[in-house]
Amino acid sequence: MQPAAPALSVGADQVADLSPNIIMELPPIPTTSTPMIAARTLTFVTKRKRQRVHIRIGQPVRDVPTVSGLDWRCPISMTGLKKSRRPQGIGVDSLQALIDALKAVEVEIDARARDSGGRFEWLGMSWHWLPEISLSLPLTRWRPMRRTRRVPDRKRRRGAAR
């Protein structure tokens, strides 16, 4: 029987040895808030009441420990419902963390509406989610169409004249 491998704690400036005999113990993902960069107030409507729900997205910060260094997180605050939540967007860079945070807001809002039978409104109208964000490259390369002169098909012209 082989003795258990010692636990290894990885700091922000260290890169861990990824050999299979070492078990990684990383500190928990920080949950501190950061300065707010975006906010929206929605109204949650049920048959019995209307209540305001405040969504705040914090500035991305690079402080999530990983085995290869630090990743980014984007804190989210959702208050105004029975259970206030503080999910986070996580990513390898600040843009991915921000996009993940926006998607997390969408998922959370959808789950709340579905679970409670209510709906969310923004500016007095039904809230229809956030615009779709896609940063992936298209499958085919876009090329402008060439302007070509269409040459009439003589056979078709002859047949139409009859």
Image (spheres, rainbow, N blue to C red):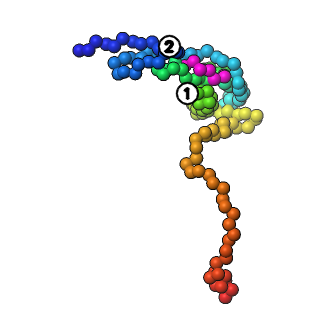
* Image-quadrant location for residue 58: top right
Residue 88 x %, y %: 58, 23
Residue at screen point 71% across, 34% down: 121
Pick the front one: 126 or 107: 107
Q: Residues within 10 Å of mark 1 (few under 14, many from 20)?
A: some
Q: Is residue 73 left or right of residue 40?
A: left
The kind of secondary structure element at disc 1 is: loop
Q: Is residue 135 left or right of residue 69?
A: right
The kind of secondary structure element at disc 2 is: loop
Residue at screen point 65% across, 34% down: 119
Residue 74 x %, y %: 61, 24
> Is the N terminus in the top left, top right, bottom left or bottom right quadrant?
top left
Residue 112 x %, y %: 60, 29
The secondary structure making up most of the magenta span is strand
Q: Is residue 70 magenta?
A: no
Whether residue 24 is situated above or below residue 134 in the rendered picture: above
Type of amino acid at the residue the image marks with label 1: Val
Q: Is residue 43 left or right of residue 8?
A: right
Pick the front one: 15 or 33: 15
> Is the C terminus in the top left, top right, bottom left or bottom right quadrant?
bottom right
Would residue 28 be seen by someone viewing this image from the given angle? no
Type of amino acid at the residue the image marks with label 2: Gly
* Mark drawn on residue 11: 2
Give the residue furthest to the right: 123
Q: Residues within 10 Å of mark 2 (few under 14, many from 20)?
A: some
Magenta extent: 58-64
Distance from disc 2 to disc 1, alpha carbons, whole Å, reads 17 Å
Give the residue furthest to the left: 1
* Image-quadrant location for residue 149: bottom right
Name which of mark 2 and mark 1 comes first in the sequence.
Answer: 2
Residue at screen point 34% across, 18% down: 21
* Mark drawn on residue 92: 1
